[in-house]
Amino acid sequence: MSPMFSEVYMKILVIAFLVVILASLGSALFYLVRDKGQSERTAKALTWRIALSITLFILLMAGYYTGIIPRGGL
């Protein structure tokens, strides 16, 4: 697999993670407004957002250390 091929997949993966993180944040806002803070759905959506953000951070660090992400960034 060529380095350019890996970079493209890494970019797609990062963008996909960001979209899912934003969707989770939006669903948390929706549940907060709809349920008026009376259910645990807001907390669960925010927990998913935090877990996805940490996973993305670890993925970016692993990509940097393995050389998939060059020093100049994506």
Image (spheres, rainbow, N blue to C red):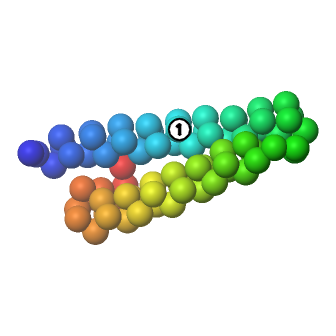
Quarter of the image where the N terminus is located: top left
Front one among 53 and 38: 38
Residue 33 higher or lower than 51, as above or below: above
x, y percent for residue 41? 73, 43
Q: Is residue 70 left or right of residue 22?
A: left
User: Residue 65 occupies which quadrant of the picture?
Assistant: bottom left
Give the amino acid type for the residue marked by disc 1 in the picture: Val
Identity of the residue drawn at 51% across and 52% down: 52
x, y percent for residue 5? 18, 40
Identity of the residue drawn at 54% across and 56% down: 51
Front one among 23 and 74: 23
- Seen as rendered, the residue at the extreme front is 39
Identity of the residue drawn at 88% across and 44% down: 38
- Seen as rendered, the residue at the extreme left is 1
Can you identify the residue that label 1 sits on? 20
Front one among 18 and 24: 24
User: Residue 29 occupies which quadrant of the picture?
Assistant: top right
Identity of the residue drawn at 86% across and 35% down: 35
Q: Secondary structure at mark 1?
A: helix
x, y percent for residue 24? 62, 40
- Seen as rendered, the residue at the extreme right is 36
Q: Is residue 73 left or right of residue 24?
A: left
x, y percent for residue 37? 87, 44
Residue 51 higher or lower than 16, as above or below: below
Answer few, some or many: residues within 10 Å of disc 1's Cα (few below 14, many 20 plus, some between 14 and 19): some
Q: Is residue 15 left or right of residue 12?
A: right
Front one among 40 and 10: 40
